[in-house]
Image (tube, rainbow, N blue to C red):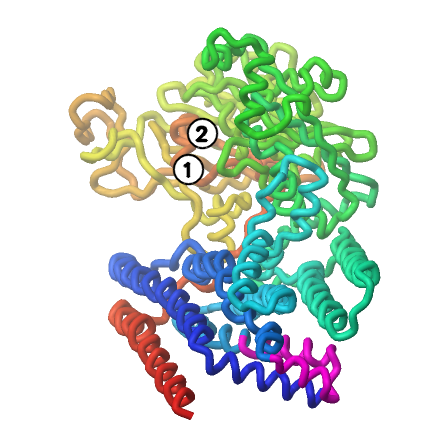
Amino acid sequence: MKIILKIARAELRNLFYSPIAWLVLILFYFFAAIMFAIPVERYAIVQEVYLEEQPDWVGFAQSLCNLMLNPIIDKVAEHIYLFIPLLTMGVINREISNGTIRLLYSSPVTTREIVLGKYLGLVLFNMMTLAITAVVMVIAYFNIRGAEFQWFFSMFLGFFLLINSFSAIGLFISCLTQYQIVAAVFTFAVLFVLNHISAIWQQYDFFRDITYALSMNGKAGFMLRGLITSRDVIYFVLIIILFLGFALIKLKSTQQPQKWTVNFLKYAGLLVIVSLLGYISSRPGFVAYADVTSNKVNTLHPATQGMLRQLDGSPLTVTLYTNLLGRSSGSGLPQNRNEYVWNFWEPYLRFYPNIKFRYEYYYGLKPGDSSVFRQYPGKTLKQIVDIHAEIFNVRPSLFRPFDEIKNQIDLSQEDMGLTMQVEYKGKKELLRAYKPPGVWPDQVNVSGTLKRLLATEDVVVKFVSGHFERNPLEGSERDYAGHLSSKSGKEALINKGVDVDTISLNAGIPSDTRLLVIADPRSAYTTEEQARISKYIREGGNAIFFAEPLKNFILQPVLDSLGVYLDNGIIVSPNEHEMPHISSNLLTRAGNFMAKEPKMQVFQDYNIMGASVQNEGTGNISFKDTNGFKIEPVIVQAGDHKTWLEKGTLVVDSAAPVFSAAEGDIQKEQYVVAVKLTRKINNKEQRIVVCYDADFMGLRRMVNSSLNLGLYSWGLYNQYPVYANYPKAFDRFLNINSSYAIKQKLVMVYLVPAILILGAIILLVRRKRK
């Protein structure tokens, strides 16, 4: 061990007195400093403006560590291989070209001690390099309030393993030639290939698996984001062992010449052993994980984990159906398979390793779809397929006609886009992909599909039809398909485990109805129909009513028994920016605790923000507890001297309305837009919502709403959707102001590099004189 340390010290001394090594150190620091200092200054200015305008400002929406350090991480990880050849090009061949290798061979020093000593010297220098760049991270730790030390540790571990793996490769290559420039060029070429090999020949299964195993840059990605896995750590350790072993074999063959077949077997044997260990350590179920982030953002949400725990260990088979001519087809092609498995499914494999993957490739068009033929006039379908295959650089023969897979999956009701079919214990359900950029489904979508697989019966929200109500299956601005039944919408209820359908009151309300919705009827219900609705309510059924001013008389007979009264008139608030009947309103505390939509979850956790809606023509609800119901407002509009309940005729696209007490206009301190009703009946809690506006759930107003599916979730006893909201990041504030950030930038970007350059010059000049 003493000899190894002596060799390491000698190697470190050679590196330390090398101008190239100092150049690497300074460039590393300068690159990191400038990429950190400039964003800090910008965010400090933004923070001051927000705090001045909003004293109760809750901080930046995202983690400041991620916002400011992730760009540095990505750039360093992407370009770190450029500097390694400059350090390793003379590690071994310098001894060979100078003839000192013979002295080492003749001295009581083993080849193993030479290799390990040289490599240890490189490791120590790499630690110095990382230590200098660590100055930036230390400054970041004190600049950012609530910065995560554990995440910094994971990031440095990733960089440490990555740079030392590159160094081991460079050391081996320096054994192959006695010319340092040749070694540097060859090392650069090898590292360049290893850094970008994951983008080569990905359309071929054999090469895709090999290139994924050889690609090094991606292996550090999880650690750089705060997720340490045994697979990645073992991978880098094995790479280091492999190339140090290669170097040892090479030097021994130089010292004691043997047949090339013997050396070949040594190389091959070591490669096979390392590959086998790497394969075993990367199998699902054999990988240990440590998510060091405070909010566990690299780990599936506990609710999603709970869904996976309900599976009994039986195989979960996922078949990806990719239509060459369909939506988001590029993401499903063979060259993107590693991204699909390791970036999307990896978090699920961590908790449920028994997931099997299958792939089906086809081409086809929806019946009546002529858009592709218009794009390629005069071309046949087969010719169009050949053109698309050439564009995506895949073999046309890989894709079968749609008619050949009809027996495998029913896509007749789909849009022929990228789709997954998930099979569990013989039951099959769809898991849809979406349009870029967020192609793959979120956790809430996956959980919705898992709930379908585990459920004994479908969960359906039923909308009353027959009186021109809002339609959950139509996509117009008035109707509700956008957030309910749109299969291409990631946020739609159908993609979160719940179906929607319509029913007619002529046939009565089915006894298995989980949630009944009556949305803005335009004609009055008959006495029999009203009686059926009242019977459903009387027996404890959950319901949501969407009423509209000027049509309040249609639902009022049913609402009378609930103690809810829809006052006449429309709430108006004239202003110069918007029509007077349009307003943005907040949910009350009771409203924010109805579900776990993101903004509602923030309110529940931190008592800040909360969900809001944009109403278009709403009225005021009066209420009193009746028939055992407890009634609470859930959406309110604040009253002021410019807001009132307009009882006269309102023309929204003409002159602004004027308050007139003579016409019955009323001003209130607060207007109730929606209420929730609860009572205990039949050993369960009955839940009813009454909203005095139906437009705020329409396609146009939902864009400005953060209530989303909260009302439906509450009506389904919060069993659907399975929300996966992570806590807000702790590091949302800076500890410094803009003045300090400017001074800090001057010191970090100009003064410190100048001191390093001056110190290097003095050290190297003095060394030269000696």
Question: Mark 1 or mark 2, which has the lower sequence index?
Answer: 2
Residue 355 position within the rendered picture, expressed as x and y whole percent measured from the top left: 76, 42
Q: Secondary structure at mark 2?
A: helix
Residue 697 marker? 2
Q: Amino acid at mark 1?
A: Ser
The local crowd at label 1, few if under 14, some if 14 to 19, many if 20 or more residues have their Cα within 10 Å, is some
Q: Which mark is residue 626?
A: none
Task: From the top left corner, tell me how far across and down residue 660 is, in percent.
Answer: 18, 29
**Is 471 within the magenta?**
no
Q: Give the quadrant of the C terminus.
A: bottom left
Q: Is residue 305 above or below residue 263?
A: above
Q: Position of residue 529 (x, y in %)?
A: 57, 14
Q: Quick one: 689 or 261, which is closer to the camera? A: 261
Q: Secondary structure at mark 1?
A: loop
Could you say which is closer to the camera, residue 753 or residue 330? Answer: 753
At 75% from the left and 75% from the top, the residue drawn is: 255
Query: Could you tell whether 708 is left or right of 460 in the image?
Result: left
Prevalent SS, magenta region: helix
Report the span colored magenta. Answer: 99-125
Quarter location, residue 51:
bottom left
Residue type indicated by callout 2 = Met
- Say whether residue 304 is visible: no
Horizontal arrangement in the rendering, residue 291 relative to residue 481 (left or right): right
The residue carrying pointer 2 sits among few (fewer than 14), some (14 to 19) or many (20 or more) residues within 10 Å by Cα, namely many
**Residue 705's mark?**
1
Q: Position of residue 477 (x, y in %)?
A: 41, 21
